[in-house]
Image (cartoon, grey):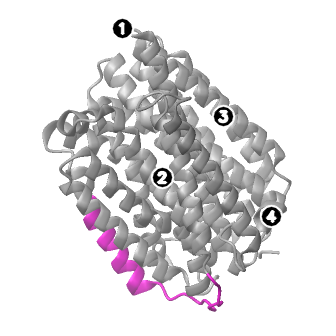
Amino acid sequence: MGTRIDGVGLRSARGPVLLSIMLSTFLIAIDSTILSTAVPTIVRELGGFDQFPWLFSVYLLAQAATVPVYGKLADTFGRKPVMVVGIGVFLLGSVLCALAGSMVWLIAFRALQGVGAGAIMPTALTIAGDIYTVRERARAQGYLATVWAVASVAGPTLGGLFAQFVSWRWIFWVNVPIGVLALWLLWRAYREDFARRPRRIDYAGAVLLTGTLVLLVLGVLEGGDAWGWMSWPSLAVFGSGLVLLLAFLWAERRAEDPILAPWLLRRRIVSTSTLAALLIGVVMMGLVSFVPPFLEDAAGAAPIVSGLALATLTLGWPVTASLAGLFYLRIGFRRTALIGAVVTIAGTALVAGLAFAASVPLTALGCFVVGLGLGLVANPTLIAAQSSVVQHERGVVSGANALARSVGGAGGVAVFGAIANAVIAASGDGAALHAGASAVFAGIVIAAVALFGACLLLPTVPIQDEPA
């Protein structure tokens, strides 16, 4: 499919492809909120409260580990086959999650979902980058923002309703018809104009990166709980993770076509936008993972109420994401991202200030403000990086961005979970949960300030329809 065909919209020649991208994105968007509202219900049925952070971390780890591989595959074989495989694997993982009989199996099948998600989001973004110019993407973002807006309401609402009145297992069954429709539209409508480029996939790098991430997150999540921080299991896990990290860096320097190409770090626009994506993951998943349990326990909110409070995060995001194109076309990518980072800091500060006085409406307001800020950071930084490379590099750039956001989310959940567990264990009284939440939300504020620093480092990039 060419890059210029009769405008942007669902009724245009590219409309069915856009709808397929929207449905595929919806699978990922709704997954970020629908599960968190049902965590207390799942724990009551399956047990394993201390393991629940793994429901998020293992998904994000699997996503992070596979994103670079999918990015290379998309640049080698085309976007369509990668997207089809990703949606298929995600649906298989969803069905198995719905059938899981224990927390361990649910965590394992969440990992399989993550393997599929690793293909969906970056490939969807890459397809959008292929079929729309930079200026057209400013309009296309309005459609994609609508997806996040719908998911922000539908996810928590469905999650709360299923958890309270039906079964949490329907959280995963609902993915099946959506994914099947997205597959059908993609297969029928998308005819990509893509010249295959023979490339060698760096499987060794992918395995080493996966091992590194798993060991480091395992050490953070289990340290101070399953074993002491300075015990031999903790030292062994962190030590092994460090060894694999060094091995990964060594292997990437010698790989013919490394999974994380050295030029990604050498190009300032790509490296700074990737750093921003990592910090976006930390902020977003920190709130997604801890706001609903905090409100349900500290404020006595029902699952559907806590879910709707969190929904304002992903409701605020598309509001500004749909307007971000107007902003960056007028004032540039960097200034738009900086404004978003300032708004994000304000929102996280409000949420943190409420940790010892739990209020559902005010927490919802804080999450909404955070969403407004992230909507002005995420898309402009990614589009700036995409517009700076040629077509056959766009998949790698999109993959690196998605990888960074997944690593940030997984690492953020792990670190915040460890902080919360340590503070709660030290407090040992009725205020323990409030103290743990206060520590977590303070950490999210710090991450938001770091996000502002990353946006400050973003170079000024001229708006251009054709990559340099």
Q: Is residue 126 above or below residue 326?
A: below
| Disc number placed over residue 75 in the picture, else none | none
Q: What residue occupies the far front of the structure in this picture?
A: 232
User: Which secondary structure lies at badge 4?
Assistant: loop
Marked residue nearer the N-terminal end (4 or 3): 3
Residue drawn at x 41%, y 78% is 84
Residue type indicated by callout 3: Ala
Residue drawn at x 71%, y 32% is 449
Marked residue nearer the N-terminal end (2 or 4): 2
Residue type indicated by callout 4: Ile
The magenta segment:
174-200
Please name whichever residue, 376 or 223, is drawn nearer the observer in this view of the structure. 223
- The spot of residue 157 in percent (x, y) is 29, 41
- Comparing labels 4 and 3, the label whose residue is closer to the camera: 3
Q: Evaluate if marks 1 and 2 touch, with contact meaning CB atoms under 8 Å apart.
A: no
**Is 447 inside the magenta-drawn segment?**
no
Residue drawn at x 33%, y 44% is 35
| Disc number placed over residue 430 in the picture, else none | 1
Residue type indicated by callout 1: Gly
Residue 146 visible in this rendered orientation of the protein: no
Q: What residue occupies the far left of the structure in this picture?
A: 166
Q: Evaluate if marks 2 and 4 touch, with contact meaning CB atoms under 8 Å apart.
A: no
- The spot of residue 380 in percent (x, y) is 69, 54
Binning the other alpha carbons within 10 Å of mark 2 as few (below 14), some (14 to 19) or many (20 upward) gives many
Q: Quadrant of residue 359?
A: top left
- The spot of residue 460 in percent (x, y) is 86, 54
- Label 3: which residue? 448
Q: Evaluate if marks 4 and 3 touch, with contact meaning CB atoms under 8 Å apart.
A: no
| Disc number placed over residue 60 in the picture, else none | 2
